[in-house]
């Protein structure tokens, strides 16, 4: 497996971004996030996603020159228009504003409308914990799942991120509301492997672990079946109402193409500073909780219980030491850009 | 099926509460919430739960005389100690504070520690929407599920509530993080019915729809399997950190009995006023989203797609008209209290 160092990857991404109209600072920030995503082992949203990100710019779906524009401010709430700028730069800007407000007043809430796909949602959770803040954020998406009881894709998988800071390894959950991503379904199909748990319905309306059958029917399931379906509806309504932006339904109607994933989406970023709010960041409570969980008896011999974010830190450490594994074709593609 | 009117039920509950040391006002508020819960069709947490609530008072696990005590305040954040008071009165008080702060500053966040089981979580979502606010709240609980990859109960099912106000029927999601409640598992077992989707593991570690096998192994599953397991961990950490209260682990250790469900738990209540924040409550956006979802093709002929809260309103209307169905034994028990 070909590996490249973090610095090497970032440098290459900066070069391509500069060529595509990014200022020096924006190219640096954007490349940093893409390279960190691969470094953390989330390959689908790091380097492997980068060519499509550039393609969206070339298609005019992402405006390189846009900056988030403040719509209004009230107390520790700020609302922005993303002007269809690069989704990850816009999101980073918003979480940064929430963190700053949290440092002043305990918490901050920022919404952004008319922005673009934020790439890896976990990025903004890690951003919050790197400033000793609790982070809560989510985005809506175009429709990718049927609401419970139906066959037609009408709800988004609306990734939801929760993050708690901790010196010895922060706790960061980055989950979309579909049981599996389409990427995971395609991979299971390619490898002819059964999914570990049901991932959707087949064309006859039966729950199945057969990825190919799910891809054929197009009926993926939300986490918790009816529960995740409801959660997707609520997260979409809250974020679109507060940002004044498009809901999943609006995104489905206004998208310039069915492939313009995340075009003109709405997002919300909440940061809370426990030190400011409660006078302390109780590391002991976090350590004890994680210790308690990890002491649970493994379901299978030699098994391990992990907390959210633990795997990310292990991958980060490994990839920092041994280099980031890259898909040779994608790496060549980026080098030739 | 025996039915009683809302007024009749509330009057009876007020009588019992007064007999158990509640002031007139507290008895009224508390009975109102219990009766509304049954009215809304959530029978498990309404009348049927009431005898156990009184039992907890008699056992000294719930202090009738306690009031939430303000620990500290910062901007639009307030933190309370629940003094082991009645969980539903404490929770109502906190959401009320958040709503008042939202009316002034756009949003309010209240935490409470050392409180008790809040009974139906949806109550506080409905409370927020009745004041035209978005409501977000959750509670932690004692351990009721194994974290993913393990066999030992170490995470709570931490009910999570999201609510969006709407004139023609608010959207309210009230979900615990276990795929099924123990009540639902017992009911499926009693009726010898298979669960509609996997609800846990059997004693051999296989996913199963057999409620009896799950009750035997004690291994219920979180929504979305590994995803809900992570979500339970994060919701617990955030609420215990911010409130300064017990985490699931702390609750497990400090409970006076394994049956003291919800004893000394931690809760968080967020209210956001869209009108104040964005200058409007965009009813059109909500209506269009719900219309969009309800237009999805049903999975089975004659099927229907519902949004969260829709069923509640239908039940409320029906029970207001025809009376609330009650379990005769429970009703007699309450009448004899």
Image: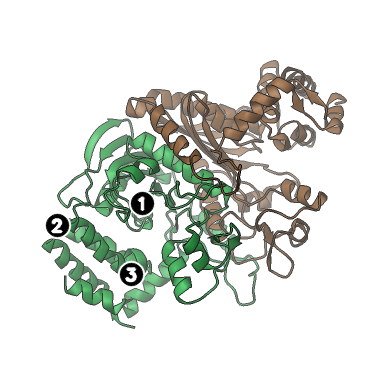
Chain colours: A green, B brown
Mark 2 and mark 3 residues within 8 Å of each other at the beta carbon = no
Depicted A248 relative to depicted A295: above or below:
above
Q: Element at badge 2? A: loop
Residue position marked by numbered label 1 in the rendering: A128
Task: Have a look at marks 1 and 2 and say if they share a chain.
Answer: yes
| Left or right of residue A96, residue A155 in this image | right
Considering only order in the chain, which callout, 1 or 3, is on the residue closer to the N terminus? 3
Depicted B142 relative to depicted A288: above or below:
above
Q: Element at badge 3? A: helix
Q: Nearer the viewer, mark 2 or mark 3?
A: 2
Instruction: Please tell me how crowded label 3 is: few (under 14), some (14-19), or many (20+) other residues with Cα within 10 Å.
Output: many
| Left or right of residue B66, residue A133 in this image | left
Depicted A12 relative to depicted B57: above or below:
below
Task: Have a look at marks 3 and 1 and say if they share a chain.
Answer: yes
Name the foreground residue: A120 vs B282: B282
> In the rendered image, which quarter is residue B58 located in?
top right
Name the foreground residue: B150 vs A59: A59
Considering only order in the chain, which callout, 3 or 2, is on the residue closer to the N terminus? 2
Q: Element at badge 1? A: helix
Residue position marked by numbered label 2 in the rendering: A22
Residue position marked by numbered label 3 in the rendering: A39
Name the foreground residue: B168 vs A278: B168
Q: Position of residue B281 (x, y in %)?
A: 39, 26
Which chain does the numbered disc 3 sit on? A
Mark 3 and mark 1 residues within 8 Å of each other at the beta carbon = no
| Left or right of residue A243, residue B159 in this image | right
| Left or right of residue B173, residue B89 in this image | right
């Amino acid at each position: 497996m070909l590996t490249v160092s973090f610095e090497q990857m970032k440098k290459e991404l900066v070069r391509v971004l500069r060529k595509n109209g990014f200022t020096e600072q924006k190219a640096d920030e954007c490349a940093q996030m893409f390279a960190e995503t691969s470094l953390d082992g989330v390959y689908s949203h790091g380097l492997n996603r980068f060519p499509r990100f550039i393609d969206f710019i070339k298609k005019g779906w992402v405006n390189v020159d846009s900056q988030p524009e403040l719509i209004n401010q009230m107390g520790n709430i700020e609302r922005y228009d993303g002007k269809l700028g690069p989704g990850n730069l816009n999101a980073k800007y918003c979480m940064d504003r929430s963190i700053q407000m949290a440092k002043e007043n305990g918490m901050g809430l920022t919404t952004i409308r008319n922005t673009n796909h934020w790439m890896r949602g976990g990025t903004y959770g890690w951003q919050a914990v790197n400033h000793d803040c609790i982070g809560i954020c989510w985005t809506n998406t175009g429709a990718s799942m049927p609401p419970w009881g139906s066959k037609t894709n009408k709800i988004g998988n609306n990734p939801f991120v929760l993050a708690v800071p901790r010196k010895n390894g922060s706790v960061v959950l980055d989950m979309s509301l579909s049981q599996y991503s389409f990427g995971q379904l395609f991979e299971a199909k390619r490898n002819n492997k059964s999914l570990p748990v049901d991932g959707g319905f087949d064309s006859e309306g039966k729950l199945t672990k057969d990825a190919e059958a799910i891809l054929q029917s197009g009926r993926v399931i939300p986490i918790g079946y009816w529960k995740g379906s409801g959660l997707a509806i609520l997260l979409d309504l809250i974020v679109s109402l507060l940002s004044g932006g498009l809901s999943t339904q609006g995104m489905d109607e206004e998208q310039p193409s069915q492939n313009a994933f995340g075009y003109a989406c709405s997002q919300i970023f909440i940061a809370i500073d426990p030190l400011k709010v409660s006078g302390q960041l109780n590391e002991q409570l976090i350590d004890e909780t994680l210790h308690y969980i990890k002491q649970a008896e493994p379901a299978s011999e030699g098994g391990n219980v992990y907390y959210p974010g633990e795997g990310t830190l292990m991958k980060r450490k490994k990839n920092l030491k041994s280099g980031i594994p890259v898909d040779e074709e994608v790496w060549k593609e980026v080098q030739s850009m």
